[in-house]
Image: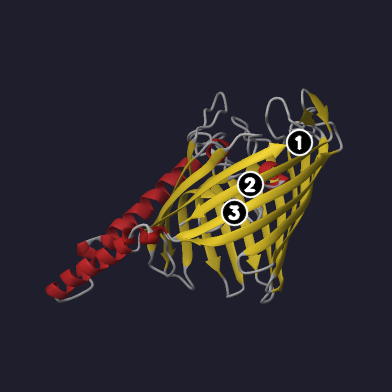
Amino acid sequence: MGTPKCLVRCFCRLMLLIGVMLGSPLFLCAQSSDPAAATANSRAEHEAWWKGITYDGLVSFFYEYNTNDPIPAVNQFRVFDYADNEPRIDEAQLVVQRAVSKPGDFGFRANFMAGSGVPEVTASYGLFRNNESGEGRHYDLPEFYVSYIVPMGKGLRLDAGKFVTPLGYENIDSYDNYNDNFSRGFIFGYGLPFTQTGLKASYAFSGRITGAVLLTNGCDAVKDLNGKVTVVGELAVTTSRTTSVTVNYLHGPQEPHNGHDEGAVYEVVATWKVVPRLALAMDGLYADEDHAAPNGSDAIWKGLAGYAKYSVTKKFSLAFRGEVFADPSGVRTGAAQTLHGFTLTPEYVTAAHASRLSPELKHFNGQLVLRGEFRQDFSNANAFHRGTGYTNGQFTAAINLIYVF
């Protein structure tokens, strides 16, 4: 029962010990027989480590209108953009980190997030989510982990803490990785976890093949819910200069106080840069969980999504997503149904010159991203609100402004 906690605790202590040791003047002095040189090296190394710390961020504002005029004003089966006809700052993010890149590097990443949409959805049990009511807060830490690259072979990277899940093609928007579409697809929202907490080891076997293994508390849980470990595996292969394939796997029990019924996720993500202006991608998912269906049988859910982005000019592009998500037991979406979605996102990107206001604001020079979105969803059941009734589809139009620095 205590093994997962013990592993996490021991690994975190090890990472902290390594960090203290590497930054210790005694350790650095021991590398040189000249005390004066050792002291100078110690000071230089210490300053270099701190100079490697960076801070970056993202702010996202949106307004969305649903032609169904649902009552209550909620867009059905949406993840972050669930508020209808209400302007919102859905995410304000600050990432403080010291990135690691070579053997012997020690670093960290902390992602602080606030807003009226994203944080209360991504919040994990045991951190900013009430374990009894399930209610999230308007702030979250989707990432906080320490990293060390072991000088072994090409460099074995070890991370300990909380991570955004490596599964899926789509992700939680960050300053260094935001999605092509404003809204998230069904696979992201209902097929996969948002975050995982535990230990991660990743290794580049060659310039084309990398792999990672995670031992975690489970899905979207900082605290140990059932005394068992969830295992996540990832194998990414660059098959050519323009194509890549990533295979993901997850296995372990996810229900609180239930270490017997296990779930599994199998996923394939592929990308293809057809020509410099056109990029395609695919995300295929199959998942199941023991005895999770309402009648006590095993629950199954699966999805398939295709993506395309075409750069009309250097600043203007069009992104399209087509998807299908099957939830025959209703355990993921709350209704036994198959969902279809079609999304078009025009995007315009321009530079944000904060330094024009003051030279001291040079660090905040970044990008302004203006996006529109038109999305049509369908279901084989009357699962969408229309006024006070129900229908089998919904159409939404949105505008999204992102500032990245």
Q: Is residue 399 left or right of residue 61?
A: right
- Residue 297: x and y in percent read 80, 33
Check the picture and name the quadrant holding the C terminus. bottom left
- Marks 1 & 2, CB-CB < 8 Å contact: no
Looking at marks 3 and 1 on the same chain, the residue that comes earlier in the sequence is marked by 1
What type is the residue that disc 3 sits on? Answer: Leu
User: Helix, strand, or loop for circle 1?
Assistant: loop
Question: Which residue is under mark 2?
Answer: 399
Q: Is residue 65 above or below residue 363?
A: above
Q: Quadrant of residue 382?
A: top right
**Side of 262 where 390 appears, left or right:** right
Judge whether residue 319 can be spotted in this image.
yes
SS label for mark 3: strand
What residue is disc 1 on?
Answer: 67
Q: Residue at x 52, y 28 (%)?
A: 130
Residue 163 located left or right of residue 14: right
- Residue 264 is situated, as x and y percent measured from the top left of the image, at 70, 46
Q: Residue furthest right?
A: 380
**Label ID, residue 370:** 3
Q: How far is disc 3 from disc 1 in space, using C-alphas?
A: 22 Å
Q: Residues within 10 Å of mark 2 (few under 14, many from 20)?
A: some
Name the amino acid type tagged 2.
Ile
What is the distance, in whole Å, between disc 3 and disc 2 at their CAs? 8 Å
Residue 84 x, y percent position in the rendering: 66, 34
Name the residue at 56% across, 24% down: 133
Dot 1 or dot 2: first in sequence order is 1
The type of residue carrying mark 1 is Thr
